[in-house]
Amino acid sequence: MPVTELTSLEDYQNTLGQPGTVVVDFYSTQCPPCKVIAPFYEEIANKPSNNQVRFYKINGLEEPGTTIQKAAEVVWWPTLVIYEDGKETWRAKVPNPPSIQPIRDLEKILDDRSKSP
């Protein structure tokens, strides 16, 4: 499933108001670790086993992303968040210098989820 950019607080709230699993990458265009993890995030989003998961990105450097980021209480780029039926169930900050471990953790959680009944 392609990654979609959320561009308003209303879209963010509506997305979380829908049932299902949502993953959000809070990032900045000026953030080197964000650029490192971006292709891995896209790869996870495009895995066939994740076809029921909705993937989004929010640029927290500019409005309205700054407002969305504040509503989500995100203070670090990049931060990855999983929501299940609108409730946050997992969050990870990617450190600087970047580590791929949070991406691996995200992938494992989603893989485990797709295997459960």
Image (cartoon, grey):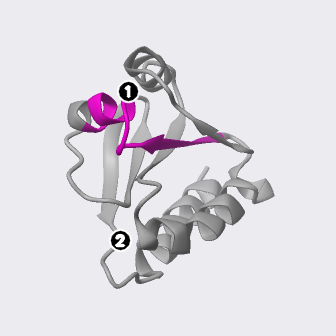
Density class for disc 1 (Cα within 10 Å; few <14, some 14-19, many ≥20) is some
Which residue is under mark 2? Answer: 94
Density class for disc 2 (Cα within 10 Å; few <14, some 14-19, many ≥20) is many
Using the image, tell me which numbered label, if any, was put on residue 64. Answer: 1
Q: Secondary structure at mark 1?
A: loop
Residue stretch rendered in magenta on the structure: 53-69
Q: Residue at x 30, y 35 (%)?
A: 66
**Given contact means CB atoms under 8 Å apart, are the residues at marks 2 and 1 in contact?**
no
Whether residue 42 is in magenta: the answer is no
Please state, as top left, top right, bottom left or bottom right, where the N terminus lies in the image.
Answer: top right
The amino acid at mark 1 is Pro
Q: CA distance from mark 2 to mark 1?
A: 22 Å
Q: Residue at x 30, y 65 (%)?
A: 93
Q: Nearer the viewer, mark 2 or mark 1?
A: 1
The amino acid at mark 2 is Val
Whether residue 60 is in magenta: the answer is yes
Q: Quadrant of residue 32?
A: bottom left
**Figure disc tally:** 2
Q: Is 8 situated above or below 47?
A: above
Q: Is 27 situated above or below 85?
A: below
Q: Is 112 situated above or below 117?
A: below
| x and y percentages locating residue 27 in the rendered image | 42, 53
| x and y percentages locating residue 75 in the rendered image | 20, 52
Q: Nearer the viewer, residue 16 or 3?
A: 3
Q: Nearer the viewer, residue 97 or 108?
A: 97
Q: Residue at x 40, y 65 (%)?
A: 31
